[in-house]
Image: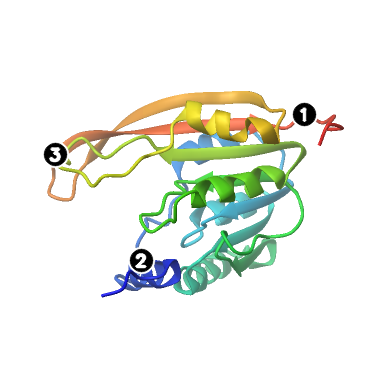
Amino acid sequence: MPEPTPEQFWEDFYRERDNIWSGKVNPLFAREADALTPGTALDLGCGEGADAIWLAERGWQVTATDISATALERAAKHAADADVADRITFVRHNLLETFPEGTFDLVSAQFLHSPVAAPGERDSIMFRAAEAVAPGGVFLIVGHAGWPSWMTEPPIFEFPTIEGTLALLDPYGPWSVETSERVEQEMVGPEGQIGARADTVLRLRRPEADSDR
């Protein structure tokens, strides 16, 4: 049986249940974005729209992308229910093939991991995301640092590290590193297991004076 395309994989993922995510903003994202001055934002892999809606409620004008049409339909409905549909443009992209035009005051890449990514796919997307950060803007990256502690035989998957991400993005700088942190949080597994999972948080700012780019 052939491997599913990324579009097929994520469509199947979202169609499995009526709602996949909690509908609440990612707490680490909110922690880092809360003090930022609202402007234009790009939300990569927006899923069902919780982060984009949170931004719009705080005055941001958001472009939110996802590969799944089903996810975007749900996100648009949630935005309408929250009365912020006029502040969010939802647009479907396979980010390896197409990417939103322009630059943004905030570019958000939250848990941008994919089990069906081609080799080098995430790196290519991160390069384009870095180029989309406007002078004075912020690139906010949150990712898993590993599998939850209760997974004794986890799948083989290489999660990005803070050091690796900084090295990857260095040619697309210069950057001011405002947050660089590994955060471990307690979690409860699907069968009630008590455990923990670590995430990484990077908040990078491009200087206002950006004459070298």
Disc 1 target residue: 207
Image: 129 above or below 141:
below
* Amino acid type shown at disc 3: Thr
- The alpha-carbon separation of the residues under discs 3 and 1 comes to 43 Å
Return the x and y of residue 42 as percentages of the image width and height.
64, 52
Q: Nearer the viewer, residue 62 or 141?
A: 141
Element under label 3? loop
Q: Is residue 194 left or right of residue 9?
A: left
Is residue 57 at all visible to an observer of this figure? no
Element under label 2? loop
Disc 3 target residue: 152
Q: Find residue 19 and name its label.
A: 2
Q: Is residue 115 left or right of residue 48?
A: left
Q: Nearer the viewer, residue 175 or 127?
A: 127
| Foreground: disc 2 or disc 3 | 3
At x 52% / y 57%, what residue is drawn?
46
Crowding around mark 1 (Cα neighbors within 10 Å: few <14, some 14 to 19, many 20+) is some
Q: Nearer the viewer, residue 84 or 135?
A: 135
- The alpha-carbon separation of the residues under discs 2 and 3 comes to 27 Å
Element under label 1? loop
Crowding around mark 3 (Cα neighbors within 10 Å: few <14, some 14 to 19, many 20+) is few
- The alpha-carbon separation of the residues under discs 2 and 1 comes to 39 Å
| Foreground: disc 2 or disc 1 | 1
Task: Determine the image quadrant of residue 168.
Answer: top right
At x 34% / y 73%, what residue is drawn?
15
Task: Determine the image quadrant of residue 7.
Answer: bottom left
